[in-house]
């Protein structure tokens, strides 16, 4: 069991969307939230926030440290939870929550910078990822809203016994 997990984990760590089609081609069917580009960006943001908050004075400001970590985790978690939800409308709602959490991360980065917990370079990198997440989520929401039936629950593979 552990060996199987390690293979899946290794694949997730190295997953790159390079095999996905361009926007002008037909959008590929996404079958797992790990395939969503914005989830991957949010994951990168979360890893960066955790590493930045493990250092120096930031690591001892428990309130801010924990809040910015929760906000970063919220971005990727709401994307995943929304993807696993029952309807496209629910998915869009979760994406909006994820976008709000990305804004929360940006706001907390300003506090972190004002408290001199981050260098300008660290702030810029984290802010860029949070902003990129927000833009990607906004575009994803726009796409889903302009294609209202692009994501429906399909039961064709479900087997029922009576």
Image (spheres, grey):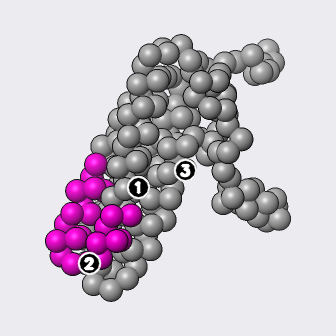
Q: What residue would you read off at disc 1?
A: 129
Residue 94 showing in the rendered view: no
User: Which secondary structure, mark 2?
Assistant: loop
Mark nearest the camera among 1 and 3 is 1
The circle on residue 40 is 3
Vertical order, 95 against 152 (above or below)? below
112 within the magenta span: yes
**Farthest residue in the left direction?**
114
Q: Nearer the viewer, residue 151 or 28?
A: 28
Say which residue appears at 79% left-offset and 15% top-offset. 162
How far, Cα to Cα, is label 2 from label 3?
A: 26 Å
How far is the residue under mark 1 from the one under mark 3?
11 Å
Q: Residues within 10 Å of mark 2 (few under 14, many from 20)?
A: many
Residue 134 in sight here: yes
In this view, the residue farthest toward the bottom is: 56
Residue at image point 75% right, 22% down: 158
Q: Left or right: where does residue 49 sit relative to residue 155?
A: left
Which quarter of the picture shows residue 120?
bottom left
The residue wearing badge 2 is 117
Above or below, 48 relative to 103: below
Pick whichever, 123 or 78, lies toward us. Answer: 123
Region of the chain picked out in magenta, as a range: 103-125
Q: Are marks 1 and 3 in contact (CB under 8 Å)?
A: no
């Amino acid at each position: 069991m552990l060996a199987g997990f390690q293979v899946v984990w290794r694949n997730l760590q190295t997953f790159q969307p390079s095999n996905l089609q361009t926007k002008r081609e037909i959008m590929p069917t996404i079958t797992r939230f790990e395939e969503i580009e914005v989830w991957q960006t949010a994951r990168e943001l979360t890893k960066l926030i955790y590493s930045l908050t493990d250092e120096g004075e930031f690591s001892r400001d428990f309130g801010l440290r924990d809040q910015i970590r929760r906000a970063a985790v919220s971005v990727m978690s709401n994307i995943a939870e929304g993807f696993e939800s029952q309807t496209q409308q629910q998915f869009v709602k979760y994406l909006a929550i994820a976008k709000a959490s990305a804004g929360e991360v940006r706001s907390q980065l300003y506090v972190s910078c004002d408290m001199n917990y981050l260098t300008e370079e660290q702030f810029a990198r984290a802010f860029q990822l949070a902003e990129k997440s927000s833009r990607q989520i906004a575009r994803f929401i726009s796409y889903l809203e302009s294609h209202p039936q692009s994501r429906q629950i399909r039961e064709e593979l479900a087997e029922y016994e009576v």
